[in-house]
Image (spheres, rainbow, N blue to C red):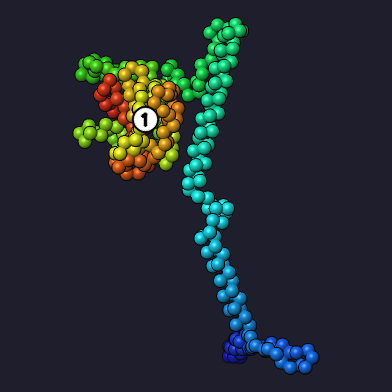
């Protein structure tokens, strides 16, 4: 009982102490006349400091949000500036690559003219992304067993023979973009390709060696680029954010030719619409590429 009274007494003493007002007076030193005075308690002093701190933080936040000073803070860089920096970085990378190719070309020409270059020693220019036609993807034991059983079962099945085979021997198709297939090849609805959902500005790669035969903007499909390949293949890449090649440029398999985007009326999000044609007819890309 005594402890409860003591606790209650301490509580009253605390509130009395912080609410007790102190008088601050200012006197004239010569006449000792009171010039100005005011009363202030600990509670009111804390409240005044709190209001002042809140006001100071609010004014600082307002200045940062409403004035260009935010561009000098980490994380507040303008989106347009970031886009320009990315494009400049891509241009610088392409320029550096072209300078290396030109330097290699000039060294080869000098070697040929001076006769110092041995026969058949000229290196292929821009061969970093060259596809090796003799490259075979290694198979696991389970896959080897499945292929062997399938070949045995289909050895005498004449129904599987294709009278018009597409020549793909020795050709390795590069995956045009990283992502998942969101829409498949369906001729019934005139969807002659696959949609690959990918991250914005992801690199779009040429699936084979070839020559760019078309670059342009379509209202429905956005930025479009088409590459003509050997053996009658044509690959089409739609809804791109930015095209990195121009008509007439030669590209190698696996080389970046565009950036994934969301352009065109028929686009529903960042993705790549990829089509593969053979001698004027569309073919299912999933039959040639492992997405």
Between residue 25 and residue 189, name the one nearer to us. 25
Left or right: 143, with 161 as reference point = right
Residue 147 drawn at (x, y percent):
34, 22
Residue at screen point 33% across, 29% down:
236
Q: Where is residue 173 in the image (x, y as percent from the top left)?
A: 38, 24
Query: Where does the C terminus fall, quadrant-wise?
Result: top left
Residue 268 falls in which quadrant of the image?
top left
Left or right, 1 with respect to 130, comes to right
Could you say whether the residue bearing mark 1 is in a helix, strand or loop? Answer: strand
Quadrant of residue 175 within the rendered picture: top left
Determine whether 76 is above or below 161 in the image: below
Q: Where is residue 83 in the image (x, y as percent from the top left)?
A: 48, 43
| Residue 34 appears in the rendering | yes
Most foreground residue, 287 or 125? 125
Q: How crowded is mark 1: few (under 14 residues within 10 Å), some or many (20 or more)?
A: some
Q: 177 and 36: which one is in front?
A: 36
Q: Looking at the image, can residue 7 be seen?
A: no
Dividing the picture into quadrants, the one containing residue 64 is bottom right
Q: In which quarter of the image is the N terminus?
A: bottom right
Q: Which residue lies furthest to the right in this view?
A: 30
Location of mark 1 (residue): 215
- Counting from the top left corner in percent of width and height, residue 215 is at 37, 30
Image height check: is 218 above or below 4? above
Count every numbered label the image shows and give the total.
1
For the point 55% across and 28% down, the residue is 96
The residue sitting at 20% across, 34% down in the picture is: 188
Q: Residue at x 54, y 17 (%)?
A: 105
Q: In this view, does 40 lie to the left or right of 76?
A: right
Point out the residue furthest to the front here. Answer: 30
């Amino acid at each position: 009982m005594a402890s409860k009274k003591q606790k209650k007494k301490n509580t009253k003493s605390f509130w009395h102490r912080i609410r007790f007002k102190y008088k601050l007076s200012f006197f004239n030193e010569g006449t000792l006349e009171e010039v100005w005075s005011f009363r202030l308690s600990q509670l009111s002093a804390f409240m005044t400091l709190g209001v002042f701190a809140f006001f100071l933080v609010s004014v600082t936040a307002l200045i940062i949000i409403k004035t260009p000073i935010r561009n000098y803070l980490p994380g507040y860089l303008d989106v347009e500036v970031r886009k320009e920096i990315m494009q400049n970085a891509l241009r610088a990378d392409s320029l550096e690559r072209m300078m290396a190719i030109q330097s290699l070309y000039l060294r080869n020409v000098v070697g040929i003219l001076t006769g110092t270059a041995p026969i058949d020693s000229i290196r292929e220019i821009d061969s970093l992304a060259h596809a090796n036609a003799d490259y075979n993807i290694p198979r696991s034991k389970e896959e080897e067993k499945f292929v062997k059983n399938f070949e045995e079962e289909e050895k005498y099945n004449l129904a599987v023979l294709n009278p018009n085979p597409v020549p793909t021997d020795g050709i390795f198709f590069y995956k045009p973009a990283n992502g998942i297939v969101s829409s498949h090849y369906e001729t019934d609805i005139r969807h002659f390709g696959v949609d690959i959902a990918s991250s914005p500005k992801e690199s779009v790669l040429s699936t084979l060696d070839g020559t760019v035969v078309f670059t342009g903007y379509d209202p429905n499909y956005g930025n479009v680029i088409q590459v003509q390949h050997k053996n009658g293949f044509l690959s089409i890449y739609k809804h791109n954010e930015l095209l990195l090649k121009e008509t007439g440029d030669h590209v190698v398999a696996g080389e970046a030719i565009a950036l994934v985007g969301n352009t065109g009326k028929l686009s529903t999000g960042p993705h790549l619409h990829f089509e593969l044609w053979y001698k004027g007819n569309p073919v299912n890309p999933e039959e040639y590429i492992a997405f």
